[in-house]
Amino acid sequence: MTDIPFMYREKLNVPRKVNFGLELELDKVNPNEVYKLVRKEFGNTWLVKEEKGLPKGENAELVSPVLNNTKETWMMLKKMGELLERISPDYNRCSFQVNFDGSMLPSIKDRVRFLKLYAMYEDIIYRFSKGEDLEYRDSLEMYASPIILSLKGVLSLSDNAAVEMYTNQKRYGIAFKDKDKDLIEFRTPNMTSDPIYWQNYINTFYHLLKCATSPRYDKEEVDKYIDAYSRIYILESYEMLREDKAKKFVKTIFNSNVDKSQFMHQYVGRRP
């Protein structure tokens, strides 16, 4: 499945009409210098602001404009990756965030189905999302914490309670945001300046959302997995390589062999 080269693509298997946005966190940088460089390279298209969870005066957060699956988007993100390589930030306490329109999960039922699917494959998603680092950052439990145990605890109350648990918060790896705009936010454990990883995140999270509302969603299997889950040391187990489960995951959410291969390259950690 990984015989296709790990590569930056001109186009993803995402409909052009789908909107998404990125938030890139940078630590141990001069925010004024970052602002000047971004303005010089990209004009006013990217917002440069402070990330409140990092030391004041030593960080920056870059917020993209609304993006779509176009050649121009991927050219711009490749250029941004090159700029970040020159800036050389510290990423030990930083995350890469992807936001999609909340309309992709229009109902409470859809959002619960998605949360369950995410929780079932959370171990695979977390290892895949570690980027180039071999270990999760120290603040992960307070920033992009796993959801499966909290979800398991609240599902018995109601679907509304389950969705509210992950609405407008900054602790978990997934969040629903209904302030200003209705968004679905993915927060990866580790930031990276490699645009190949950025493409892989965008593509994977889009297809995960679509799977939650598709006939491929196996409600019985998902419910059974969550009901039986009882691990305590979650992150230690999430670092383990589970290729068979990862292959099942990609077969569940992807149709394209290229998509499956790109995911597995990153999940296993094979680079060119």
Image: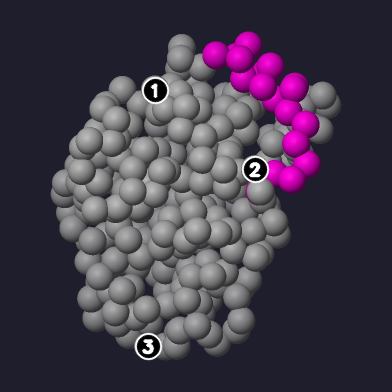
Residue position marked by numbered label 1 in the rendering? 251
Left or right: 13 in relation to 27: left
Residue position marked by numbered label 2 in the rendering? 237
User: Badge 3 local density, few (<14 within 10 Å), some, or many (20+)?
Assistant: few
Nearest to the observer: residue 123 or residue 191? 123
Task: Give the amino acid type for the residue marked by disc 3 in the picture.
Answer: Glu
Please identify the quarter of the rendering in which residue 211 is found: top left
Nearest to the observer: residue 88 or residue 271? 271
**Residue 89 location (% of width, % of height):** 42, 77
Instruction: Please tell me which of labels 1 and 2 falls first in the chain.
Output: 2
User: Badge 1 local density, few (<14 within 10 Å), some, or many (20+)?
Assistant: some
Instruction: Please tell me which of labels 2 and 3 falls first in the chain.
Output: 3
Task: Give the amino acid type for the residue marked by disc 1 in the picture.
Answer: Lys
**Residue 202 location (% of width, % of height):** 37, 45
Instruction: Tell me the magenta residue range.
Output: 218-235
The reply to whether residue 111 is visible in this rendering is no
Residue position marked by numbered label 3 in the rendering? 33
